Amino acid sequence: MKPLSRRHGLAWLAGTVLAPAAWPPVHAAPAAPGQAVAWPQVSLLGGGAWGPEHTEGKAVVAVFWSVTCPFCQRHNDHLEVLRRAVLGQPLELITIAREHDGAAVQRHLRRRGWQFAVTLDDPPMAAALSMRRLTPLTVTVDRQGRLLQVIPGEMSEGDVLALRKLAA
């Protein structure tokens, strides 16, 4: 076997020993049911920010959705009814649009009459809650900040409105 040249040896060293130090940090897995959620700070569509301070002492319903998802349209119509029903109660509602075009999402919100909070910051929210790419995807968190459920797919109006009990 031919010995490595100095150049090849240094390249091997850099690629196997030194390169991992330059790798981006590995993020923790999303919370599992019963575990505390590590809420990220995210930007809201239309301005402002949303983060851990919005969840203190409140239950949270977070919904991942897409403008092009027909199931999301019905689901989010029910979500808007829930938003109006829980005004002033300890229940925070945040939605995560899996989109890149903020202007298109804002037009969609106006057209549908939805007024719930929306972020386009999908990666940090998915890292905290669920890496599943299904839409709609509803995540519930109790008032102590523990993940309760990750609910895949469209929910009926009755099931969405039953989420009010989280505020109790």
Image (cartoon, helix red, strand yellow):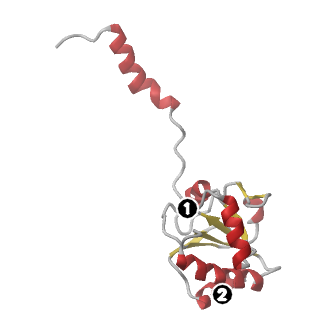
| Residue 27 in the image, given as x and y percentages of width and height | 54, 48
> Local crowd at mark 1 within 10 Å, few (<14), some, or many (≥20)?
some
Dot 1 or dot 2, earlier in sequence: 1
Task: Provide the residue designation for mark 2.
Answer: 161
Residue 161 in percent (x, y) is at: 66, 87
* Label 1 secondary element: loop
Q: Is residue 59 visible?
A: no
The residues tagged by marks 1 and 2 sit, at their Cα atoms, a distance apart of 24 Å
In the image, is residue 43 above or below residue 21? below
Q: Nearer the viewer, residue 30 or 102?
A: 102
Q: Nearer the viewer, residue 47 or 57?
A: 47
Q: Residue furthest top?
A: 6
**Residue located farthest toward the bottom when viewing the structure as drawn:** 158
**Which amino acid type is marked by label 1?**
Ala
Residue highlighted by disc 1? 31
Q: Is residue 23 above or below residue 135?
A: above
**Relative image position of residue 67 (x, y in whole percent):** 59, 69
Q: Residue at x 55, y 61 (%)?
A: 31
Report the side of 59 relative to 12 (left or right). Answer: right
- Of badges 1 and 2, nearer the viewer stands 2
